Amino acid sequence: MPHHETQPTPVEVGGFRRIEQPLWAKTAVTVGGLGLIGLEVWWFLLSRPKSRKATPEDDS
């Protein structure tokens, strides 16, 4: 069999060639992206600053 017959044919989509990626790569990118989104949500919305209200007794 010639080499060009064993390779999947890229599909042209709007001037771009579609390249099929392995499932593990798609999964890794998706999980990494969701993890980063979750980290941003936690950082900006859910984390509490470690500050406390000043009192007159704290004056050093």
Image (cartoon, rainbow, N blue to C red):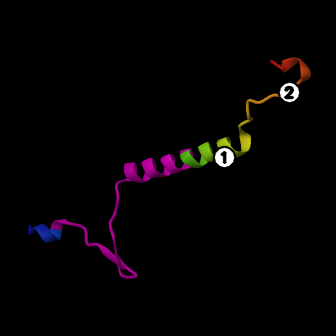
Marks 1 and 2 sit apart, C-alpha to C-alpha, by: 29 Å
Q: Which of the two discs, 1 and 2, labels the residue nearer the N terminus? A: 1
Q: Is residue 7 left or right of residue 49?
A: left
Magenta span: 6-35
Q: Secondary structure beneath disc 2?
A: loop
Residue 20 locus on image (x, y percent) = 34, 63
Q: Residue furthest right?
A: 56
Residue displayed at 40% across by 82% down: 14
Q: Is residue 26 left or right of residue 1?
A: right
Q: Which residue is mark 2?
A: 54
Residue nearest the viewer, comparing 52 with 31: 52
Q: Is residue 60 left or right of residue 27?
A: right
Q: Secondary structure beneath disc 1?
A: helix
Residue nearest the viewer, comparing 52 with 36: 52
Circle number at residue 41:
1
Residue 52 locus on image (x, y percent) = 81, 28
Residue displayed at 36% across by 82% down: 15
Quarter in which the N terminus is drawn: bottom left
Residue 8 locus on image (x, y percent) = 25, 68
Q: Residue furthest left?
A: 2
Residue 25 locus on image (x, y percent) = 38, 51
Q: Is residue 32 above or below residue 18?
A: above
Q: Tag 2: residue type? A: Ala
Q: Residue furthest front?
A: 60
Quarter in which the C terminus is drawn: top right
Residue nearest the viewer, comparing 20 with 15: 15
Q: Residue furthest bottom?
A: 14
Is 7 part of what is drawn in magenta? yes
Residue displayed at 45% across by 51% down: 29
Q: Tag 1: residue type? A: Val
Mark 2: give few (<14), some (14-19) or many (20+) Cα within 10 Å. Answer: few
Residue displayed at 72% across by 40% down: 46
